Structures are given as structure tokens and as C-alpha cells.
Amino acid sequence: MTAPLVRGEGLTRAFHRRGGLFGRGVPMMALRGVDIELHRGEAVGVVGESGCGKSTLGRLLLRLMTPTSGRVMFEDRDLATISAAELRALRRRMQMVFQDPYGSLDPRRVIGAQIADGMVIHGLAQGTTVQDRVAALLRQVGLDPGHAQRLPHEFSGGQRQRIAVARALATQPDFIVADEPVSALDVSIQAQVVNLLADLRGELGLALVFISHDLHVVRHLCDRVVVMYLGLVMEEGPAAEIFRAPAHPYARALLAATPSLRHRGAAASPLAGEVPSIAKPPSGCVFRTRCPMAQPACAQSVPALRLLPGDATRRIACHRAEEIAA
Amino acid sequence: MRRAAYRGLILPGVLAAIIVLLAIAAPIMPLIDPVRQDIAHRLTGPSAQHWLGQDEYGRDVLSRIIWGARVSLSVAFSAAAAAALIGTLLGILGGYFRGVVELLTVRAAEIVLCFPPLLLALLVVTLLGPGAGTLIFSLSILFAPGFARVAYAETLSTRALDYVTAQHALGARTRRILALTVLPNIATPLIVQFSLTVAAAMLLESGLSFLGLGVVPPAPSWGLMIRGARGAMEQAPLLLFWPCLALTGTVLVLNLLCDRLRDALDPRGRAMGRPGFLGRVFALPPVPSPPAPGLLSVQGLTLQVPGPNGPIEVVRGVSLSLAPGETLAIVGESGSGKTLTGLAVMGLLPAAVTPVAGSIMLTGQDGMPRDLLRLPEPELRALRGRDMAMIFQDPSSSLNPLLRIGTQVAESLRAHGTHDGVHDRVVALLRQVGLPDPERAAMAYPHELSGGQRQRVMIAAAIANHPRLLLADEPTTALDVTVQAQILALLQALKEAEGGMGMVFVTHNLAVVAEIADRVAVMYAGEVVEEGPADEVLAAPRHPYTAALIASTPEGEAERLSAIPGAVPQPWAMPPGCRFAPRCAMAQPACTVTAPALEEVAPRRAARCLRWRELA
Ligand SMILES: Nc1ncnc2c1ncn2[C@@H]1O[C@H](COP(=O)(O)OP(=O)(O)OP(=O)(O)O)[C@@H](O)[C@H]1O
Ligand code: SF4
Ligand code: SF4
Ligand SMILES: [Mg+2]
């Protein structure tokens, strides 16, 4: 196998609640040592409930945020050690699509100018070529090139998300992080954007990190899935496998709780309790307070992420992996 | 709305322009020299030559007022502009970089705010000596912190927005982000602050000149004029009146301009009050004979909002029915009118929305059917919380953060006449909705609970009086998947426990419909397009929109999702004929002409499509 395009190693990130004038308060561990790899043209889905660190992971990978410890390698360069100028230049190759199509576009600038920003910043095109590129990009995401001079509020949510995708594509990146890009959209529009992302990935060979809480969408778009809980990876492996037969108790619960058109009964035996606060995570396995399989030993030590016995493609973090595999 | 806001700008705008023009044009106007003395005619009243009379040195008052405006305005504008420049820069830098920079800029500026303004100005002027230059300098120091604060607060909230992060992700330099993205988006409050500051600076300038610390005589200034006139108050009281009038008038005009500017620049426009009961009833035609309801029966409900070109029907001819013990899901995309339909049932429509046709019959706890649309507010209020109750999408904004959970649940009991054993009942309710340790939860404040727990509290308050009808507007949309499953299970269990309670569940998620609903009403662009038993509708839809929605749900093994092309039409630009026609794969020319009616397609099942038979 070739070397990965992007590699996160032991990514950890703490946030400090502002406590008083001088105190820094309790550190909250949003991410607690996550490894992730992404190859060219690969789509990896990151799923989990709110506060599990999905968005933090995405922002660390793009270095929109610095990790508390761990490092991000882009090709063979460590994003923490390269110079500011090098990093700025590298930004051409990595882009982001945000969740809120209303918040991610500047309400006061016409969309053509916003799509062109990346090209102008990186000096990729000048004068009329910029206009031509903008028109081509608008066409590529299925919008009318004649609308470049309009303001964001003249577009619907789905159209805005397409504009945001066009802006991300403008610099011809190799790597895109999409943070819940369809969560704010209506079902009928959601399908349009998911299809667009799938097409673009095929055409341009983009590497995609797709963050979502909607398992069905992830299954559709991604080759691999990372299931996270309280800042840690619980299970990781091929999407098809995990959706067919999730191994980790949390992955199972998550999948079972997702309502489905095809079979009723998601609400039949829901998981008890709620996600604990990241300021006070449980000792040992972070999932143990809600895990139907928890044992006293689960409170003693944090289970490492390791290969699922008998399956060379999947890794889970559970003390009882052997029993699960059996 | 916007246009009205801009029209409001005309009056103060024109007045301010006149004042400024007069001040600018002073040198070219045929005015008597403002410093030419004429001691012989000191303190004479108005005459043909001196319209406003002459002052204590016989100088022309009108001329001095106009020249004084020049001095006052230029000092005030220069000071405000300098303050704006310095303050905004400090505020933006502090807000964007936080940390040490914030300490050095905004916090330092705030120290200035701790001094009484007049005292500070006095200090500076005493140190540097009077004169226009000193005035501008001291006034800009005084007013800069105000700008710094506004710019700081706005930058803080703007910099967290995705479009700023997006610029960063594109590799833009900080300079570019601040100038091109942050500054234009924080400009509105700064402009308002600017006009306020000009007015305040004029007042302070006059005050200082009055004290003899501002403009140096004999140069004309309103403050100096007031000072001079004070000495001659007994003999010529009018002398005091003119500069005071000029000063108050100008400050008032500037304040008005600032108010109107805020209205015009605020995209939300101004809020309106709620229409009274009479306004509501007059808009409604009488209904001949309301059909006999099961529990709830909505017939032909039409809701309007005012638009720029006449009223817009945001909900049109909606009919629904619900039997006791049933769950009806209203499903549809954003803006389809689901929420408004639910609010109409509760009698909680926003002010701008008026019902213009239809009826909403609810059978209450006493077995009496009532038309909720035509019920006076006091009677509606009595029904709310007792016969019908509602839970909302966002549990944190529906709970009062200052009151204990138990108090808030008790409130809904007390409001409907329960006064004995309230505490025990509250604890029992909290236990019933599955809060761990209900005794302690009753004493907790909302912020101590998680989102899912808060939603449980809302449900406890809603079912406190055993309502006949429970309305839930997207109650699980803000929750995590595993918590959503818990709340759905809870609602299901409650419905069984509260024998006969009907539930209307508003959602945009078809999978949730499949999970919880007995019946479903699919809404599109303000209309119900299909209604019937949930199982049947989801298994064999009789409307192309329902079919397309099901197909676009990302489940199953299909390689590509089937998306519905286009977008929901805007309420003011509804297509003629069938509202779904522009996006419908089955549309025919007839569809763009005739608006289909909601037809019965099977017992207790209806669809609004000309071609439903072909889908069967
Ligand atoms: N207070 C109001 N003033 C004017 N128009 C309104 C008001 N409230 C709602 N509308 C309009 O009425 C229509 C239906 O709104 P409604 O809130 O019922 O939609 P919805 O189906 O609940 O959508 P969502 O899924 O976004 O909650 C929309 O076009 C909306 O813009
Ligand atoms: S380690 Fe224990 S608590 Fe954690 S998932 Fe495995 S069985 Fe459950
Ligand atoms: S009436 Fe025509 S356009 Fe409307 S849903 Fe039916 S087939 Fe489609
Ligand atoms: Mg709504």
C-alpha cells in the first residue's frame, strides 16, 4: 500500500473552561489520543454523538486548531513544524466544508468573489481566468454560472452548500474535511449534496473526511468508518462491514438507535443514560456507564484499540473483544 | 418592512444634511462677520438686519450660531472619527487575537471608561491648555473606548462564525481576513455608535467651552454663546434661547438619525405586537356546521402572513383528524407549514400570522367539542396545559433558567387548580418521565441537567394535567440518536399509560415517523399532500412527493440516492396549479393548470395529486 496522504498520530486536544481571572479551570479533553489515516481518493466517515470530538478531529487535521499533543502529517510534512508561509501554501491543498450553509458564507459579499478567494490568495489565476474558473466551478456543482454576482441570501440552503463546495474545490485540493455538510439540509436537498460529493470524489480523486451523526449518509458515501465516543475511537473499519455487523457495544447501540424507514423498533430497547461530560469521563472504558456488557474489569483500565480477533480490517477498543468475535 | 425602515431615514437624514450644509456653507453665505462687534447696539432684539438680534458685544447672533455650528460640528466629527478609528482598531485586534493583545487593547481602553468623562476632559484640557486641537484630542480619548468595546464584542462573535474560519482554511492572511471579512460584518453597530458619539461629543464640547476650557473666544461656539448669554440673562433672555435651541435640536436630530439607522440596518426589522382576539375573529368567515370530531379535527385551515404584494398563504386548506389514543405525525421539509399548523392548534400563532379560513375542533376533557380558532383567549388559556399541551424542539429555551425544575413542573399543576399534594405529584411525574433520583432532580436548576433530561422535564410539565392532546414539535431533533430513541420510547409508553391521549408529532424525519406514528400527514409548501395510516403511506405512497421523499432517504443498498431536483418554492412565488409540479417526475401539462384537491384514495386515506391512480 502507498503512504497515506494525511496521518493523525495520537491527536489530543484539551479545552480550558475559563475559570476566574487567572485560573484556567478544569481541562476538558475533547480528544484523547486518536490515530487516523487517509489515503488519496479515500472517504472516511467519522460518526458519534455530540461532544465526542468529531469536529475537533476535523479541525486538527486541517490545522485550524493546534493539538495539545500528537501531530498531523500531510504527505511527509509535519504540520506543526513547517513555517507559517509553507502552511499557508499547503492550505491550497486542503479545504473544509462546514455544517451550516447559512453561517459559512459571508453575507455581505457576492458568491463569485467568495469562490474566487482561494484562487486569489494563492495566486492561481488572474483577471478573466478567475471569472471563467468561477463559472466552471458553479457549473460543476450544478448552479447557474450567471448567478456569480448574487449575494448568499438569494440562495436556498442546498444551493448555499453547493456554493461552499465550489469554494472548497476552487484551489483544486487533494483533501477535504466536510463537517456535517448535510445535517442542516432538508431530506430532498440532502440527497442532492450527498450525490454531488460522491460524484466529485470519483471525478477528482479527493480524499474526504466526512463527519456526520447520520449513519445512513455515511454508509452511502464512505469506504471506511471511525466510530467515536467521548474523544476516543471505539471502532474503525470498512463501512460495509461495520454497518452489516457492528462489533463494539457502542457501535451496535448507535446503529440500533438510528430510526429506519424499513424496520420499526429502534426505540424498543434504547441505550440507558446519556453521554457523560467530557470534563468528568468515566475511569477505564469511557463507555462503561452505558455499556450493556460492562464488567468490573472495564472500570480498571482503558481498553486499547486493537484488531478484532479473526478480522484483519477492523479494530475495536473493548476488553471483551474476544467474546464479541467468538 | 425594509422599505418602511428606509423611509424612516428620510426625515432625520434631511434635517442632518441641512445642519451640516449650513455649517459647511457658512463662509460663502451672505452673513455678517461673526466677530464684528457693535457695542452701541449690544443686546438689541431681532431686527431686519439681525434676524436673531445682537449679543453682549453687539455681534450678530444668527451668524454666530451658523459659524458656531461649524466649530461644534467639526470638533465633534473629528473627535468621533478619531475615536472610531482608534477604538475600532483596538477592539478588532483585541477581539480577534484575544489573550495578551486583548489585555493591552480592550482592557486598557476600559480603564479610561472608569473615569467620569467630564473630569477626564477637564484634566486633559488643563494639562494641554484650551483650544480646538486639545478638544478634539481629549474627546477622542474619551470616546475611543466605547468604539473599542462595540468592535470587540462584535469581533468576538463574528470571528467564531464559519465564514471567518473558512477564510482561514483557504489560507488567507490575518490582514486580509480582518479587512475583507470581519470589518464589513461589524460595520453596522459601529455606524450607529458613530452617530451617537457625534451627538455626545457636541454636548461635551459645548460644556467645556461653557466652562472656558474649549474653543477660545472670540471664535464662535455654542458653548461660548451660552456662557456669554448667561451673564446677560436678565436683560436678553432670548440670547440664551438660540444657542440652546441649536444644540438640543442638533443632538435630537442626530439621535433620531441613529435610531432610524439602527432600524434600517437591522435585517430583522422591528417587532410587532400580537393581534387581539377580535382581530382574529373578524378575519374568519363563519363555518356552516363543524364536522363531528374524534379528538381533533382540523378542516380547511388557511393561514396568511402579510407580504409586500398582498397577503401570502403560508398554510392552505390543511385538514387533519386524530382519534383518541392515536399518534399523528406531520412530516415535511423546512417551511412547509408544520410548525404553524401545530401553533394554530395551540392558539399560539406569531403576531404576523392570521387564520383566514377553516376550523379546529378539539374534544376537551369534559367531552365538549370546541372550535379553537374561534375561542376567546381566556378560554383558550384554560384549555392550554390542561386539555392540550405542547413540547418544543429546544428544551433549554423553554425552561426558565432561574427556577428549580420542580417549581416549573408544579407551576403547570397550580395553573389548573391543583394545590394539594403538589410536591408528591411533581416527584411522581419526574419519576414517570424517567429522571433518575426525582427527589433531587426537582431541586435542580435547568443548567444542571443534560439536553435529554431537560426534554424529559418539559414532557413531565406537559402531561401533568393528563391532557387529551399532546403536541410535540420536533421534540428529538436537538438530541443525540441514542437519546432520541429514549425519548421516543418514553412518549410511546406515556401514551399507553395515559389511555386515550392523542399525540401530534411534528418532524422532518421520515424514519422517526415510521418509528412512532399511527397516522401521517405529509406537508409540502403549506398543503397536506397525503394523509393516512403511517404503514400504508410509507409502504405504498399515493403522492409523487411522498414517494420521492422515501426514495431520497439514505437507506438501503442503492449506489446513488435519488434526489428531488430543485428546491421548495418560496411562499410568495407559488407555482400555479399543483405546487409540486416544478419538481415532480410525473408532472403533465394539466398539473401546471389545475390545483389538485385532497381526494379520498382509500378509507381514511387521502392524496392531493391528479395522477394518484397511476401510483396505485
Ligand atoms: N412569524 C412569521 N411571520 C411571517 N412568516 C412566517 C412566520 N412564521 C412562519 N412563517 C412562514 O410560514 C411558512 C411555514 O412556516 P413553518 O414554521 O410552519 O414551517 P415548518 O414546516 O415548521 O419548517 P421547519 O422545518 O423549518 O421548522 C414559512 O414560509 C415561513 O417563512
Ligand atoms: S470495555 Fe467493557 S465497558 Fe467498554 S465497551 Fe467493552 S465491555 Fe463495554
Ligand atoms: S398533480 Fe401532477 S405535478 Fe402534482 S404531484 Fe400529481 S403528478 Fe405531480
Ligand atoms: Mg418547524
Image (cartoon, rainbow, N blue to C red):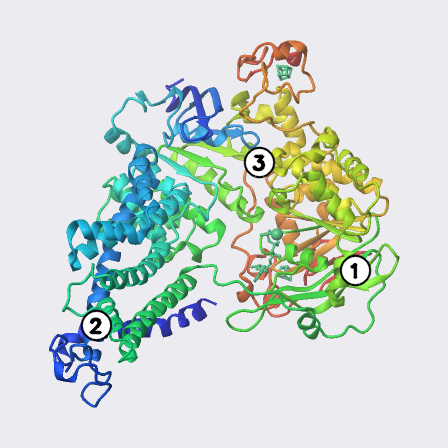
Q: Residue furthest right?
A: B367
Label 2 with label 1: CB-CB less than 8 Å: no
In x, y percent, where is residue B463?
77, 45
Q: Amino acid at mark 3?
A: Asp
What is the C-alpha distance between the residues marked 3 and 2? 65 Å
In the image shown, does A179 or B159 lie closer to the viewer? B159
Labels 3, 1: front one: 1
Corner quadrant of residue B345? bottom right
Discs 3 and 1 share one subunit: no
In x, y percent, where is residue B497?
84, 40
Corner quadrant of residue A110? bottom left
Q: Amino acid at mark 1?
A: Ser
Identify the residue position indicated by label 2 in the image: B23
Corner quadrant of residue B433? top right
Question: Label 3: chain?
Answer: A
In the image shown, does B569 or B278 lie closer to the viewer? B278
Q: Is residue B381 above or below residue B86?
A: below
In x, y percent, where is residue B527?
66, 61
In x, y percent, where is residue A156?
48, 54
Quadrant containing ligand 1: bottom right
Labels 2, 1: front one: 2
Q: Amino acid at mark 2?
A: Ala
Identify the residue position indicated by label 1 in the image: B297
Question: Label 1: chain?
Answer: B
Discs 2 and 1 share one subunit: yes
